[in-house]
């Protein structure tokens, strides 16, 4: 279903663009068994690692639709940026989730209800079918994800942290921010007093009568302890990347588009990839998810570019020495395992005198500061991002023409 190449991503987007306006707005919530005429794009796995970055998606859509006509589709693309920005401004939320998860994984290792849920034996037909789809396809329709998470939390009364972890381990498009915070929202932790409850008639309608839920689903949300969100931090300002230095570009799975934009910005003399393989395996990521992201990197990179893992710090240093580099440049990774792995790598390189320069794409720099509250306040920044996108595209066109 998902081929880890740039061309496959573009083909999927181009085939869906005609539906990005009124069709998507009216039918995006339908999850039918026949996906041959889907009313959702299914491009999220490529957006997740920026094989297909958000700004390219929106630019392509705006060539055929107005921003107003495609507003629902644009909003959905921006939700991922919002979640990433929100968590980037509150790293302690991720840290707390990781601490909870460590304890819960141990206490629930032999829990029968948890085991039945992840083995598709919960006894709730729709839930078990979605679970098999998740495992087999590494993808679920967004509405199915909401129903699944609601049943997990409010009906089965399993910890949301374990559900978020299960999704992250199995989804091609699962990233720490959008996945973790979406589960918190369903549980009623993201927006105080608001949770999401799956309803039998809603499932019946939006699956095209595919599922007639025979068991009773929760009609009340679980009680959750009130959580005070930490105040958003101020994003770190990165020093300018120096001119006249021999710099190497280190590309990660968090932003494969850096091969283009960051290389142009910094003028690197050598490029390499970095994949946190050991961190992924320790987190029990599905082999298919690991392969999808690794293959995505390999297919984006030049054949001469080495691909390092988090066990290759010595090899990274050898590469730096062999290329006579003065330092390395990395696109700022969002909160999550890749960020932690990269920080460990950079620390290990410091004794050898290697300087690391971080860079933030203008898209993130423009939008992250607006992720201070809810999405609807964040939406106010979308016109500014679209305007900046048009300006940058014009500059790029002028530069290519030598104007």
Image (cartoon, rainbow, N blue to C red):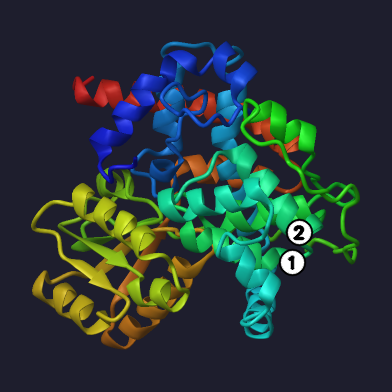
Left or right of 7 in this view: 120: right
Tell me the quadrant of the picture where the C terminus can be found: top left
| x, y percent for residue 114 | 66, 70
Residue closest to the eye, 391 or 273: 273
Residue at x-position 45% and y-position 35%: 42
Marks 2 and 1 close (CB-CB < 8 Å): yes
- The image quarter containing residue 277 is bottom left
Q: Nearer the viewer, residue 114 or 168?
A: 114
Q: Which residue is at a point 46% across and 56% down the rendered structure image?
A: 135
Quarter of the image where one finds residue 162:
bottom right
Please rate how many residues cluster around mark 1, counting C-alpha atoms within 10 Å: few if below 14, some from 14 to 19, many from 20: some
Q: CA distance from mark 2 to mark 1?
A: 5 Å
Residue 199 against residue 324 in the figure, above or below: above
**Mark 2: secondary structure:** helix
User: Is residue 241 positioned above or below 72 on the image?
Assistant: below
In the image: residue 20, left or right of residue 359: right
Instruction: Tell me which residue sits at (64%, 45%) in the image.
Output: 126
Against 384, residue 99 (above or below) is: below
Foreground residue among 399 and 83: 83
The image quadrant where one finds the N terminus is top left
> Residue 168 placed where, x, y %?
53, 60
Name the image quarter holding residue 316: bottom left
Q: Which residue is mark 1?
A: 158
Residue at 28% in and 51% down: 296
Vertical position of residue 258 compared to residue 378: above or below: below
| Tag 2 residue | 153
In the figure, is residue 392 to the left or right of 144? left
């Amino acid at each position: 279903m998902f081929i880890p190449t740039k061309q496959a991503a573009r083909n999927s987007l181009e085939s869906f663009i005609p539906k990005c306006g009124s069709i998507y707005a009216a039918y995006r919530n339908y999850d039918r068994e026949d996906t041959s005429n889907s009313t959702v794009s299914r491009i999220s796995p490529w957006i997740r690692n920026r094989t297909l970055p958000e700004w390219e998606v929106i630019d392509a859509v705006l060539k055929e639709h107005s921003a107003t006509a495609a507003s629902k589709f644009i909003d959905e693309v921006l939700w991922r940026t919002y979640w990433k920005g929100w968590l980037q401004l509150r790293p302690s939320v991720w840290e707390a989730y990781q601490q909870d998860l460590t304890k819960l994984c141990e206490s629930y290792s032999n829990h029968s209800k948890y085991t039945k849920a992840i083995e598709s034996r919960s006894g709730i037909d729709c839930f078990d079918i979605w679970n098999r789809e998740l495992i087999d396809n590494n993808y679920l329709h967004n509405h199915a994800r909401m129903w699944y998470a609601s049943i997990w939390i409010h009906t089965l009364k399993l910890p949301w942290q374990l559900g978020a972890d299960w999704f992250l381990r199995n989804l091609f498009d699962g990233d720490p921010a959008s996945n973790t915070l979406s589960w918190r929202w369903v549980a009623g932790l993201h927006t105080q007093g608001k949770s999401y409850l799956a309803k039998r008639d809603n499932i019946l309608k939006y699956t095209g009568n595919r599922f007639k839920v025979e068991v009773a689903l929760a009609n009340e949300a679980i009680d959750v302890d009130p959580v005070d969100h930490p105040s958003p931090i101020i994003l770190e300002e990165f020093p300018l990347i120096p001119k006249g230095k021999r710099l190497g570009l280190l590309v990660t799975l968090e932003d494969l588009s850096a091969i283009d934009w960051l290389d142009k910005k910094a003028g690197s003399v050598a490029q390499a990839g970095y994949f946190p393989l050991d961190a992924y395996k320790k987190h029990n990521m599905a082999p298919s998810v690991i392969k999808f992201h690794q293959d995505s990197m390999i297919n984006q990179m030049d054949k001469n570019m080495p691909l390092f893992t988090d066990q290759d710090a010595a090899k990274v240093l050898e590469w730096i020495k062999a290329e006579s580099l003065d330092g390395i440049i990395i696109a700022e990774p969002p909160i999550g395992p890749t960020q932690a792995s990269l920080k460990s790598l950079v620390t290990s390189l410091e004794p050898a005198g290697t300087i690391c320069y971080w860079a933030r794409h203008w898209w993130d720099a423009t939008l992250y500061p607006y992720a201070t509250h809810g999405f609807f306040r964040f939406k106010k920044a979308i016109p500014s991002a679209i305007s900046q996108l048009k300006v940058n595209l014009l500059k790029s066109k002028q530069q290519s023409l030598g104007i």
